[in-house]
Image (tube, grey):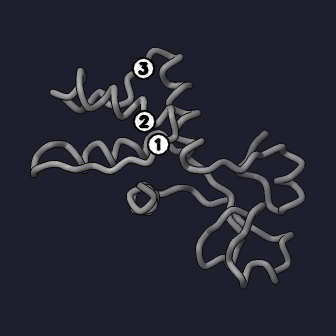
Amino acid sequence: MDYLNIKSLGELKKSNWVSKSIKDELRDNLISIKKEGKKVFSEIHGYEETVLPDLERAILSKHDINFLGLRGQAKTKIARKLVDLLDEHIPVITGSPLNDDPLISISIGVKYLDNSSFKLAVAIGALVLSTVLKLF
């Protein structure tokens, strides 16, 4: 189904779109990338035998992740690469201050909106990165 053309909550429900937590989304996308034989963190060098396998195991196990280390140890670069594991498009309700999940809205104001109108937002790297960093 073409998710970019969905204009209402009813259409979203009919499309069988499933809401996922960020940990589930990271895990599912990592699994599909690994099945294709691609490397997720190909631009990060020097940690192929230590940090990166541990990070992949943590993502697959849905663990919380906290990056610690001195300057220059690729913490930010790794966090920026995690954005590549998120879905490109996410649906949000128009008028939602948090751009939260249309099926499980937590915004008080959104609960009183007519849920038939919503927009499909494109995940922007910087916005998603700040969200990912807050969650980790």
Q: Secondary structure at mark 3?
A: loop
**Residue type (three-letter) at the residue carrying disc 2:** Ala
User: In which quadrant is the C terminus drawn?
Assistant: bottom left
Query: Disc 1 designates what residue?
Result: 63
- Side of 54 relative to 84 (left or right): left
> Residue at (75%, 63%) from the top-left corner?
104
Reading the chain from its start, which is encountered first: label 2 or label 1? 2
Image vertical order of residue 20 relative to residue 39, above or below: below
Q: CA distance from mark 3 to mark 1?
A: 22 Å
Q: Secondary structure at mark 2?
A: helix
Image vertical order of residue 81 relative to residue 109, above or below: above
In the rendered structure, are the residues bearing label 2 and label 1 in contact, judged by CB atoms less than 8 Å apart?
A: yes
**Residue type (three-letter) at the residue carrying disc 1:** His
Query: Disc 3 designates what residue?
Result: 38
- Side of 1 relative to 128 (left or right): right
Query: Disc 2 designates what residue?
Result: 58
x, y percent for residue 82: 40, 43
User: In which quadrant is the N terminus drawn?
Assistant: top right
Front residue of this view, candidates 51 and 19: 51
> Residue at (46%, 37%) from the top-left corner?
59
